[in-house]
Amino acid sequence: MANTPQSKKRARQNQTRALINKARRSRIRTHLRRVEEAIASGDKDAATTALRSAQPELMRGVTKGVFHKNTASRKMSRLSARVKALG
């Protein structure tokens, strides 16, 4: 357990950041799920628009430290290849 005032404050900050990161990660996963669903339905237009909306969310997650840069790049590469293959 935190004993010093500094460590108590850090514990509070960590709880706050964890909630913010959890919401951010959830929002990104929702966008990725929409792309997956559009790909599964075979609708290339819907998949393309979903991918375009997912990309900035994913990159925002990188800048905020939720995902690693290479992880986001890998996800975008694989999704875009699958969307491209629909045509």
Image: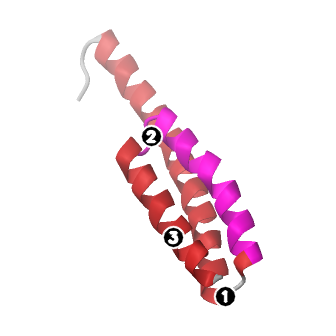
**Secondary structure beneath label 2:** helix
- Provide the residue designation for mark 1: 42
Nearest the viewer among 78 and 85 is 85
Confirm or deny contact between disc 2 and disc 1 (CB under 8 A): no
Residue at 62% from the left image edge and 83% from the top image edge: 86
Question: Which residue corresponds to mark 3?
Answer: 81
For the point 23% across and 29% down, the residue is 1
| Residue 53 spot, x, y in % from top left | 70, 56
> Between disc 2 and disc 3, whose residue precedes?
2
User: Residue 52 vs residue 16: left or right?
Assistant: right
Report the span colored magenta. 45-68
Residue ranking furthest to the top: 5
| Label ID, residue 18 | 2
Establish if 63 lies above or below 75: above
Question: What is the three-letter code of the residue carrying label 2?
Answer: Ala
Q: Earlier in the sequence, mark 2 or mark 1?
A: 2
Q: Residue 27: image x %, image y %?
A: 61, 55
Residue in the image at 54% along x and 61% along y? 29
- Whether residue 83 is in magenta: the answer is no
Q: Residue at x 43, y 36 (%)?
A: 65
Alpha carbon of mark 2 to alpha carbon of mark 1: how far? 36 Å
Disc 3 + disc 1, Cβ < 8 Å: no
Circle 3 residues within 10 Å: few <14, some 14–19, many ≥20: few
SS of the residue under disc 1: loop
Quadrant that contains the C terminus: bottom right
| Secondary structure state at the residue bearing disc 3 | helix
Residue 80: percent from the left, percent from the top? 55, 66
